[in-house]
Amino acid sequence: MQHSTMNLTLKVWRQRNSKASGGFETYPVPGISTEMSFLEMFDVLNERLIAEGRDPIAFDHDCREGICGMCSMVINGRPHGPWKGTTVCQLHMREYKNGDTITVEPWRANAFPVVRDLMVDRSAFDRIIQAGGYISVNTGNAVDGNAIPIEKDHADSAFAAAACIGCGACVAACKNSSAMLFLSAKVSHLTLLPQGQPEKRQRVVEMIDQMDKEGFGSCTNTYACEAECPKEISVTNIARLNREFLSAALGSGD
């Protein structure tokens, strides 16, 4: 089967490190197959740059299956590009037309400093998880899956929240660079399950405290985070986070 090809122009953010000043550079990218993924198109460009003795464009990637959340790019002003509920690696070039100009830049947030080009340091998320995104359990054999009864609604909501891949698109989409959707997903999937109950007060307080220390902004309920989340995490988790935080602050328990 013969695939159609097209010629594109990329405007890509280039920045040597977090201390350097960056800027856009323009690259013609001819002969791109419509069946390529967006990252495969970048591979083709980088192979050409290397062959020409130039520095390839640095970008994060790992699984290329929409699972890891590494492929953090803002494409024509939208985190992960124009397709809803997908990561960059799931975006395919058939979305674009011959002659299009595509602008690609990294996440923009003070808490996510640029490492190089399109790569940002998202270790702030790791530190938020370390502050409380875990449960303390005895080690040993795995407990039977049916040993602890869990309401189906709670199980479904916890599973949906746990789908968060920590990519940071919510932060990049938010005008305040808020991490509330990410944090609320991590708090929700533990709070909704029996295993997460013993530490739930401590968890929400310490994770919010760490989020504030990292320099993320406040949530003003514009819902941009939900709109751009590749796993379509619901903002109802933010409401749950706020309730849990208020409950912990008042010491009411529930």
Image: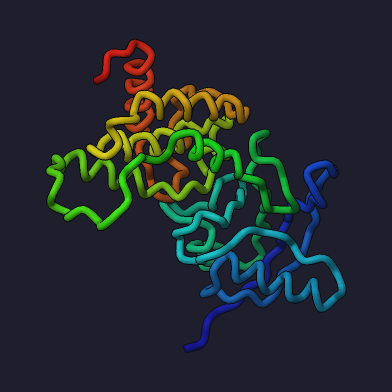
Q: How is the image coloured?
A: rainbow
Q: Position of residue 133 (x, y in %)?
A: 43, 38
Quadrant hosting residue 246: top left
- Residue at screen point 74% across, 53% down: 117
One can see residue 16 in this view = yes
In the image: residue 23, left or right of residue 169? right
Against 221, is 33 above or below? below
In the image: residue 24, left or right of residue 224? right
In the image: residue 184, left or right of residue 87? left
Q: Nearer the viewer, residue 5 or 55?
A: 55
Q: Position of residue 83 (x, y in %)?
A: 46, 54
Q: Position of residue 189 (x, y in %)?
A: 32, 40
- Residue at screen point 65% across, 61% down: 100
Quadrant hosting residue 176: top right
- Residue at screen point 40% across, 29% down: 203
One can see residue 181 in this view = no
| Quadrant position of the C terminus in the picture | top left
Against 16, is 136 above or below? above
